[in-house]
């Protein structure tokens, strides 16, 4: 997907990371889940005026997502993502103006790799 910069508007970022489960329940007990970044930019309406989205940080911009056609064992996941910091949502992945709204999903201590017996 391509985004074109229009006027002073910054194109939104598309990203997927592993973070804390925002929907943890009996049906979804996992501590970590796949999250996607909602492609929104604070300055979306910048061409029309200043601070047009004053509450843009009121809701999280990283949300639960369900990967399609996921399999437990594939050539792509032979080396488990546990212990690989680049796959986890950290504060460095979140825009400064989105930190507060996403604080519950940010992983501070990256889990160690789990070795299968």
Image (cartoon, rainbow, N blue to C red):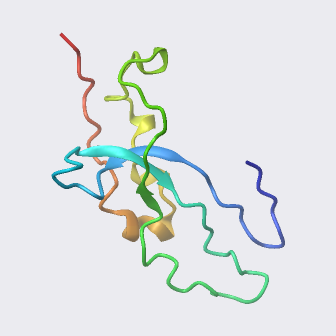
Count up the numbered dots: 0
- Residue in view at x 39 percent, y 49 percent: 90
Where does the image place residue 36, in percent across and percent down from the top left? 49, 52
Where does the image place residue 74, in percent across and percent down from the top left? 44, 17
Where does the image place residue 58, in percent across and percent down from the top left? 43, 78
On screen, residue 64 versus residue 14, left or right, reads: left
Q: Is residue 42 above or below residue 105?
A: below
Quadrant of residue 54 within the rendered picture: bottom right
* Foreground residue among 96 and 29: 29
On screen, residue 111 versus residue 63, left or right, reads: left
Q: Residue furthest top?
A: 117
Where does the image place residue 22, in percent across and percent down from the top left? 30, 58
- Residue in view at x 67 percent, y 75 percent: 43
Quadrant of residue 30 within the rendered picture: top left
Quarter of the image with the C terminus in it: top left
On screen, residue 18 versus residue 96, left or right, reads: left
- Residue in view at x 73 percent, y 48 percent: 1
């Amino acid at each position: 997907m391509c985004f074109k910069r229009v006027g002073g508007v910054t194109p939104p970022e598309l990203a997927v990371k592993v973070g804390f489960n925002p929907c943890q329940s009996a049906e979804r007990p996992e501590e970590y889940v796949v999250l996607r970044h909602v492609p929104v930019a604070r300055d979306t309406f910048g061409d029309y005026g200043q601070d047009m989205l004053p509450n843009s940080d009121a809701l999280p911009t990283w949300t639960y997502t369900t990967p399609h056609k996921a399999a437990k064992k594939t050539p792509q996941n032979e080396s488990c993502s546990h212990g690989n910091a680049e796959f986890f949502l950290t504060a460095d992945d979140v825009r400064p103006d989105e930190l507060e709204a996403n604080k519950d999903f940010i992983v501070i201590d990256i889990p160690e790799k789990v070795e299968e017996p």
